[in-house]
Image (cartoon, grey):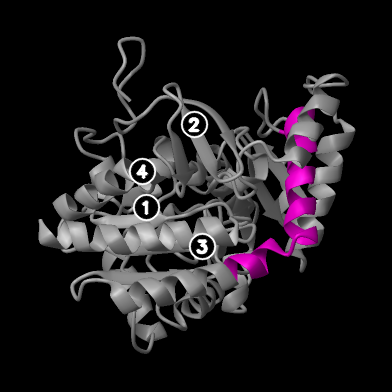
């Protein structure tokens, strides 16, 4: 956003004033169907009554409790661990997804050190995205975000593995790829089950299983970054559920706060308990009663409304329609309502985005080359709005191809 008072970090576009459901309204009164939603933040849309009510109630009672616990945060932790199931018993709350990722890596290193393992090697994925600060940026496998930052985005021991999209996954070959990049003791693997910002890349069947087996064989921890994919976005509550592969550490964020900043790290008891109270803390993480109340409202709407299933149905419907009409050189892929349209060039992707905006529909652009248009509307998007997204996309396909 270009404005004299702001650092120019956002794409040019309208200045927004209000939002309701899947729609945003700018300062000139123009309405836009928001198919960015954060990106991926507003799974309930804008101004959802349950979120508004939670904010109003909690703001009048308690917003922040210093270093003391509070009821909303405790309740949110309990609901998160119940939702994730399995061995997850502890939660650390952070201020953002990036901060939660750095927390997860710090915890993994602390846990491994407690077992006498002091190596540095952490594997992430090519085209993976985990944030733009410190370790999170080093883990990110997208050079586009590291331009002009020599040394800053490096971190001892972090390597990146390729992500197969089709075919059989060879565990031995995966191990050889790792060994070719690092001879150090592998402590952890950090991966998105579906690579969102990196281009909506769905790994080949068996890849997540191979990562799990690689970690088990080498005594490493498997960390799944579900900041973008979690809480129904991909058609299941968590994207890892499709593979049946469970991580040792689970990181969530984005939609949990419905627009308020939050990240969460879920761990089994043995990992979470390796930290002493003074080992890690933040001013706002874990004591934000307001975020706790909003997070509870989001989780309850997610489960009561069956929004993961709704995302699966809507996503399949939309992708079927787009695949049948997309230009031959545009690939449509995704899971649930995390959908990518890969164009041959970045110019075409940006032209598509501009034409969609001109027609009142907001979409994202990502990928290593910024050639992938991303469709991530709220999970409770109405059937009418979904049809509008479909029809507008089909008409813009024709417009961009004619150019």
- Name the residue tied to disc 4: 155
Quarter of the N terminus within the rendering: top left
Tell me if residue 305 is in the magenta stretch. yes
**Residue at screen point 77% across, 60% down:** 303
CA gap, disc 2 and disc 1 = 43 Å
Pointer 3 with pointer 4, Cβ within 8 A: no
- Name the element at disc 4: loop
Task: Tell me which corner region of the image, top left, top right, bottom left or bottom right, holds residue 330.
Answer: bottom left
CA gap, disc 4 and disc 2 = 42 Å
Pointer 2 with pointer 1, Cβ within 8 A: no
Q: Which mark is residue 158?
A: 1
- Name the residue tied to disc 2: 25
Mark whose residue sits in front, 4 or 2: 2
Mark whose residue sits in front, 2 or 1: 2
* Depicted 345 relative to depicted 98: above or below: below
- Crowd rating for badge 2 (residues with CA inside 10 Å; few <14, some 14–19, many 20+): some
**Residue at screen point 30% across, 41% down:** 358
The image position of residue 399, as x and y in percent, is: 19, 57
Q: Earlier in the sequence, mark 3 or mark 2?
A: 2
User: Which segment is the magenta one?
Assistant: 286-312
Left or right side of 19 for 340: left
Q: Earlier in the sequence, mark 3 or mark 1?
A: 1
């Amino acid at each position: 956003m270009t404005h004299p008072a702001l650092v120019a970090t956002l794409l040019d576009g309208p200045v927004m004033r209000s939002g309701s459901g899947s729609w945003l309204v700018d300062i000139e009164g123009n309405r836009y169907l928001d198919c960015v939603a954060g990106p991926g933040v507003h799974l309930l849309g804008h101004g959802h009554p349950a979120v508004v009510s939670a904010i109003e109630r909690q703001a009048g009672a308690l917003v922040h409790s210093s270093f003391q616990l509070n009821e909303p945060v405790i309740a949110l932790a309990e609901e998160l661990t119940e939702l994730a199931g399995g061995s997850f018993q502890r939660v650390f709350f952070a201020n953002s997804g990036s901060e939660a990722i750095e927390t997860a890596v710090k915890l993994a290193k602390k846990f491994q050190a407690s077992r006498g393992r002091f190596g540095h090697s952490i594997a992430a994925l090519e085209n993976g995205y985990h944030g733009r600060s410190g370790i999170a940026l080093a883990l990110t496998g997208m050079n586009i975000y590291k331009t002009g930052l020599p040394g800053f985005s490096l971190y001892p021991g972090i390597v990146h593995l390729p992500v197969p999209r089709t075919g059989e996954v060879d565990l031995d070959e995966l191990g050889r790829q790792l060994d070719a990049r690092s001879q150090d003791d592998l402590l952890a693997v950090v991966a998105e089950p579906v690579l969102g910002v990196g281009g909506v890349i769905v790994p080949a069947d068996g890849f997540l299983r191979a990562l799990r087996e690689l970690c088990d064989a080498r005594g490493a921890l498997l960390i799944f970054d579900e900041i973008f994919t979690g809480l129904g976005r991909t058609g299941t509550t968590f994207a890892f559920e499709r593979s049946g592969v469970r991580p040792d550490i689970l990181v969530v964020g984005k939609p949990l706060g419905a627009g308020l900043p939050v990240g969460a790290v879920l761990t089994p008891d043995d990992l979470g308990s390796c930290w002493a109270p003074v080992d890690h803390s933040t001013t706002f993480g874990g004591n934000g009663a307001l975020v706790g109340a909003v997070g509870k409202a989001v989780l309850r709407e997610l489960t009561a409304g069956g929004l993961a299933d709704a995302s699966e149905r809507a996503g399949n419907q939309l992708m079927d329609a787009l695949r049948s009409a997309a230009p031959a050189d545009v690939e449509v892929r995704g899971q649930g309502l995390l959908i990518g349209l890969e164009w041959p060039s970045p110019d075409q992707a940006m032209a598509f985005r501009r034409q969609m905006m001109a027609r009142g529909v907001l979409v994202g652009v990502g990928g290593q080359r910024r050639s992938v248009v991303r469709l991530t509307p709220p999970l409770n998007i109405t059937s009418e709005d979904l049809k509008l997204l479909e029809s507008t996309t089909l008409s813009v396909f024709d417009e961009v191809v004619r150019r």
